[in-house]
Image (tube, rainbow, N blue to C red):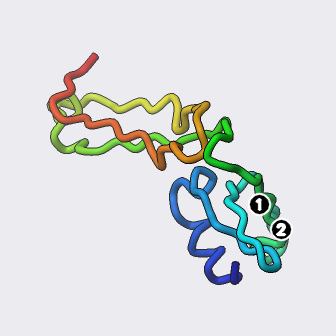
Amino acid sequence: MAPNELMKELRKAGFYTTLFDLKVDAKTERVLPRDVQFDPVTDRPIHVDFLRVSTTTTVTVMVPVVFKNEAASPGLKRGGVLNIVRHEIAFICRADHIPHAIEIDLTGCEIG
């Protein structure tokens, strides 16, 4: 993966839940990012760890939680506060069924 492509992917939400096809020599491997090490001065990635997976591999991943339609929530309009306790939820699932995000629709939600 080219450095510019890696930077684009790192900026996206759900980088650690996205499967990639990584070409090693003449063979293509299906991989899941596990860790990224950054240069302490430039903050650019210097190393990425990947986990090789197949369609039957079970993995544990942290899936981001996304809240939508905050403007359509009567509770928030009346002065309520959305207190987000967990920004990510741990999932144990097959590698080919990882959700990119969990969306919570706040439409119609009242205080309490």
Q: Name the residue at 54% across, 41% down.
A: 63
| Front residue of this view, candidates 48 and 109 | 48
Q: Name the amino acid type tagged 1.
A: Val
The dot on residue 80 is: none
Please tell me whether mark 2 sits on a helix, a strand or a loop: strand
Reply above or below: 96 against 93: below
Q: Residues within 10 Å of mark 2 (few under 14, many from 20)?
A: few
Label 2 sits on what residue type? His
The relative height of residue 40 versus residue 70 in the rendered view (above or below) is below
Q: Residue 19's image quarter?
A: bottom right
Residue at point 52% right, 63% down?
12
- Earlier in the chain: of badge 2 and badge 1, it is 1
Q: Quadrant of the C terminus?
A: top left
Placement of the N terminus among the 4 image quadrants: bottom right
Q: Which residue is mark 2?
A: 47
Residue drawn at (45%, 32%) of the image:
84
Q: Which of 60/35 is in front?
A: 60
Element carrying mark 1: strand
Name which residue lies at 51% across and 43% down: 97
Q: Are marks 2 and 1 in contact (CB under 8 Å)?
A: yes
Q: Residue 56 vs residue 44: left or right?
A: left
Q: Residue furthest top?
A: 112
- Name the spot of residue 90 as percent of width and height, x first: 60, 32
Q: Which residue is mark 1?
A: 36
Residue 44 position in % (x across, y down): 75, 74
The image quadrant of residue 108 is top left
Q: Could you say where residue 11 lies in the image, as x and y percent from the top left? A: 56, 67
